[in-house]
Image (tube, helix red, strand yellow):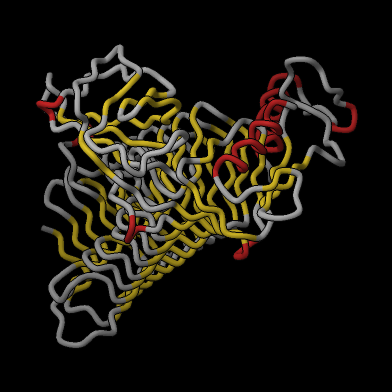
């Protein structure tokens, strides 16, 4: 289902609840300002490729040109032809645009990053920076500027694009709006997501490979980047995408609603595989293979009414699934969670009852060989309440362990454990 179809169904549902039956799509007319449109048989498609294509090129500029062209005409598809595309900046997605690759033959790879220190203070109203060493930096590069905040001691992180230069001085596409001073050890690096979007909606990404080239790139936190990074978006479908080898997260979305991640292969990322981020409502993560990350699926802050089902989550270094800070009313169902380094499913302790992950359900999953020799396959901690752990199969095949299938912390309340099948553990349940 494309983003516009998702929007149509949501609006049709609202109209139907208010007026009775939803409108017949065959009778809908294209009307100025109305996001509900007829179901067109054909929409605009622009091809991009290293050879014969509407837009010829194999870098972020060619891809961005196609996205911008399609977006200007009201939406459609950017068809990315087979080839290897080397990116020095993120491709910024746009509302109403589908970006579709040619499967494993379409590879977008992040070029190696370079870093240097700032040579001069830049104030919050400035729109330029001066580098100590400008070698390797180019106009059009996506950069990440980082420094210790001089006012609160935290780290300031901004993403910008270099748009003009004189020697070691570079103009940015937008003002800083934060102070980056030499006393804060300010640096700049050519770091960016591969695909990104901000304040956009009704988008589809499908059938391509995103490679973060982690051995040649510095780390960038999943709150700012990943193979795909989205901020303040809605109605997004990501299907059949490989997100691999990013020195950070695989796919991260922050304050994004109704995001579908389906049939993707997310592996080899330094941090989180799937990162439904702060405040994201109704994420659906279905049928994905998620392995060899630090954490498989990380429910961040205030993620609610989400669904993770039919995923293969294996060999993640810390946790298969982690649920925490005000993540409530989520369902984790029918997943295979294997060989997690620390815990298969963790309910994080957080800062007290008001911050705990309440009313989550863990149903019908298969957990195999998770945790170290004295660890736990499922660990419910903090002041977490109203958790259902039901009809799961917890299987331990490794010998000589002291593992416990399910640990329930002393401050938890109303954790229901029923109809689970447990095999090979020293203890089935530990209530502390």
Residue found farthest to the top: 125
The image quarter in which residue 161 lies: top left
Q: Residue at x 23, y 29 (%)?
A: 156
Q: Residue at x 47, y 34 (%)?
A: 140
Q: Residue at x 19, y 28 (%)?
A: 119
Q: Is residue 365 left or right of residue 73?
A: left
Say whether residue 391 is visible: no
Q: Nearer the viewer, residue 289 or 54?
A: 54
Q: Residue at x 26, y 65 (%)?
A: 317
Say whether residue 404 is visible: yes
The image quarter in which residue 373 lies: bottom left
| 290 up-or-down from 42: above or below | below
Q: Give the image location of residue 278, x and y in percent.
A: 35, 35
Q: Nearer the viewer, residue 142 or 100?
A: 142
Q: Give the image location of residue 336, x and y in percent.
A: 42, 68
Residue found farthest to the front: 167
Q: Nearer the viewer, residue 296 or 402?
A: 296
The image quarter in which residue 137 lies: top left
Q: Give the image location of residue 123, x and y in percent.
A: 23, 15
Q: Is residue 79 left or right of residue 356?
A: right
Q: Is residue 357 left or right of residue 171?
A: left
Q: Is residue 154 left or right of residue 254?
A: left
């Amino acid at each position: 289902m494309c983003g516009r179809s998702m929007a149509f169904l949501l609006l049709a549902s609202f109209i139907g609840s208010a007026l009775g039956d939803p409108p017949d799509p065959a009778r809908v007319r294209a009307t100025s300002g109305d996001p509900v449109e007829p179901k067109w048989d054909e929409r605009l498609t622009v091809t991009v490729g290293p050879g014969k294509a509407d837009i010829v090129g194999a870098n972020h500029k060619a891809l961005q040109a196609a996205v911008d062209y399609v977006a200007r005409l009201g939406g459609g598809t950017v068809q990315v032809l087979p080839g290897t595309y080397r990116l020095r900046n993120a491709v910024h997605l746009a509302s109403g645009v589908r970006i579709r690759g040619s499967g494993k033959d379409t590879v977008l790879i992040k070029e190696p990053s370079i870093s240097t220190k700032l040579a001069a203070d830049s104030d919050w109203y400035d729109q330029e920076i001066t580098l100590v060493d400008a070698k390797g930096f180019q106009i059009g590069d996506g950069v990440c500027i980082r420094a210790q905040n001089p006012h609160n001691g935290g780290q300031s992180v901004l993403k910008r694009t270099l748009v003009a230069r004189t020697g070691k001085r570079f103009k940015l596409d937008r003002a800083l709006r934060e102070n980056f001073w030499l006393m804060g050890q300010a640096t700049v690096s050519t770091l960016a997501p591969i695909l990104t979007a901000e304040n956009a909606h009704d988008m589809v990404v499908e059938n391509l490979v995103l490679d973060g080239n982690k051995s040649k790139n510095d780390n960038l936190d999943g709150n700012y980047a990943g193979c795909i990074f989205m901020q303040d978006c809605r109605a997004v479908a990501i299907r059949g995408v490989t997100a691999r080898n990013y020195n950070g997260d695989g796919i991260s979305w922050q304050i994004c609603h109704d995001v579908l991640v389906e049939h993707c292969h997310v592996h080899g990322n330094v941090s989180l595989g799937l990162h439904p981020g702060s405040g994201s409502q109704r994420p659906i993560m279905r049928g994905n293979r998620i392995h060899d990350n630090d954490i498989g699926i990380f429910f961040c802050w205030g993620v609610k009414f989400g669904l993770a089902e039919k995923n293969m989550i294996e060999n993640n270094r810390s946790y298969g699934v982690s649920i925490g800070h005000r993540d409530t009313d989520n369902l984790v169902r029918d997943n295979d969670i294997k060989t997690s380094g620390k815990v298969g499913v963790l309910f994080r302790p957080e800062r007290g009852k008001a911050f705990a992950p309440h009313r989550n359900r863990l149903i019908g999953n298969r957990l195999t060989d998770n945790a170290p020799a004295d660890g736990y396959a499922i660990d419910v901690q903090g002041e977490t309440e109203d958790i259902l752990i039901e009809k799961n199969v917890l299987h331990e095949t490794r010998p000589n362990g002291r593992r416990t299938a399910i640990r329930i912390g002393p401050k938890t309340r109303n954790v229901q454990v029923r109809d689970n099948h447990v095999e090979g553990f020293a203890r089935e349940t530990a209530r502390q």
